[in-house]
Amino acid sequence: MKRIYSILVENRSGVLCKVAGLFWRRCFNIDSIVVGETDDKAVSSMIIVSNGDQRTLEQIEKQLNKKLDVIKVKTFNENESLNRELLLIKIRYNRSNRRDIMENCEIMGAKIVDMSKGQMTIQMCDTPERIQIFMGTLRSVSIVEIARSGVVAMTKCNE
């Protein structure tokens, strides 16, 4: 079972290390982690995706709430949230596969952001599942380099 933790922390050096250390010491897994400043420069937002059984996920939340640098912890499941991930992928192409690559980009909502003779860099911002599907369409080409962000998430709007 996956759980997303949205954590507000004090924006100072060492906080990320303390939070990561909590996961390391207790052998909890981090699937992805994204950290960035909020509109208040004294506060950072961490989005951590982890998985485990119900007991483990509850234990993670309890341990996070005990940390002095943690201001607030919200948890939610993937179906309760909007999730996005950024993919940058550099591939080799040739005349015979260029058109197929461009069509796949158009269908999946990816964008070619850089191109040279024989290589192109593609950007895609979507759910982790759709990014995996898109990467599957590129199995037949030579991948030079991949960079993926972690999951950025927030709860859906309530009305």
Image (spheres, rainbow, N blue to C red):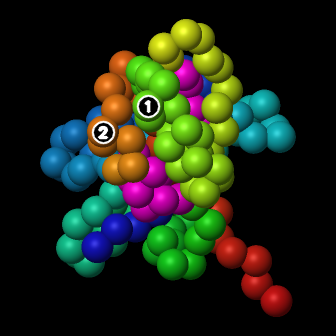
- Looking at the image, residue 89 lies above or below residue 71: above
- Element type at mark 1: helix
Q: Where is residue 122 in the image (x, y as percent from the top left)?
A: 57, 32
Q: Which residue is outermost to the front?
A: 96
Left of 46 or right of it: where is 53? Answer: left
Quarter of the view holding residue 73: bottom right
Quarter of the view holding residue 124: top right
10 Å crowding of disc 1: few (<14), some (14-19), many (20+): few
Q: Which residue is outermost to the bottom?
A: 159
- Looking at the image, residue 42 lies above or below residue 45: above
User: Which part of the image, by quadrant, shows the N terminus?
Assistant: bottom left
Q: Where is residue 95 in the image (x, y as percent from the top left)?
A: 48, 25
Instruction: Work out how far the residue at label 1 is from the one at label 2, CA to CA, in angstroms.
Output: 12 Å
Q: Name the residue under label 1.
A: 96
User: Which range of residues does the magenta coloring cover?
Assistant: 120-135
- Looking at the image, residue 12 lies above or below residue 22: above
Residue located 18% across and 49% down the image: 26
Q: Which of marks 1 and 2 is nearer the N terminus?
A: 1
Residue located 22% across and 40% down the image: 24
Q: Mark 2 points at which residue?
A: 140
Is residue 63 visible in the rendered image? The answer is no
Q: Position of residue 133 (x, y in %)?
A: 41, 57
10 Å crowding of disc 2: few (<14), some (14-19), many (20+): few
Residue located 40% across and 67% down the image: 3
Of badges 1 and 2, the one in the foreground is 1
- Element type at mark 2: loop
Q: Does the magenta stretch include residue 126?
A: yes
Amino acid type for the residue under numbered disc 1: Ser
